[in-house]
Amino acid sequence: MNLKELYQEIILDHGKNPRNLGKTENFNKDASGHNPLCGDKVHVFLKLDENKKVEDISFEGQGCAISMASASIMTDLVKGKEENEVKEIVKDFLEMIKEAPELKSKNLKDDEKTKLMCLSGVKQYPMRVKCATLSWHTLTTAIDKTQDEINKGNN
Ligand code: ZN
């Protein structure tokens, strides 16, 4: 199996059997995102503990295989990491998916980088980049949302 086949295999697997699908119990951050170009929708639920570590994360949504696989892989990777590590990983991923040849984050293990690099193929298809980044932007929105905004019910 070459690298490209391995990548496709992982995307298909996550697209068919998304990890962390559903609504996390007792989530304290959430946000929804929409990619009108493709019709993808995603809602990310996050539970941060008192040390701002991601205790649990899940998502609900519907869309193309790329958007669902990306959300699945993302939730898998950020679970158990601290908020500032998560932000750094998001930034690293967004740079990679747009132009950077590789991931630089020290917060990612080699096997985690391999999973993310599966999505690097969308670089050749600018329309699909938004499918891959939707859940990541939504995660950032959820993390950055202040308690005030949550109380007001802004989404
Ligand atoms: Zn899509």
Image: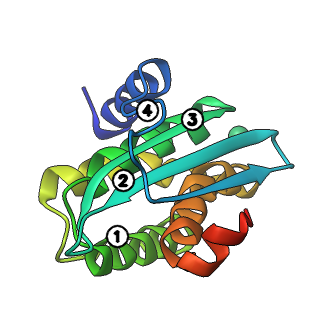
For disc 3, the marked residue is 60
Q: Is mark 3 within 8 Å of ligand 1?
A: no
Which of label 2 and label 3 is nearer to you?
3
Separation (CA) of disc 2 from disc 3: 23 Å
At x 67%, y 53%, the residue is 32
Residue toward you, 111 or 45: 45
Separation (CA) of disc 3 from disc 1: 29 Å
**The disc label shown at residue 102, or none:** 1
At x 74%, y 67%, the residue is 154
Mark 2–mark 3 CB contact (< 8 Å): no
Element at label 1: loop
Q: Is residue 151 above or below residue 68?
A: below
Q: Is mark 4 within 8 Å of ligand 1?
A: no
Mark 2–mark 4 CB contact (< 8 Å): no
**The disc label shown at residue 117, or none:** 2
**Residue 139 position in % (x across, y down):** 51, 62
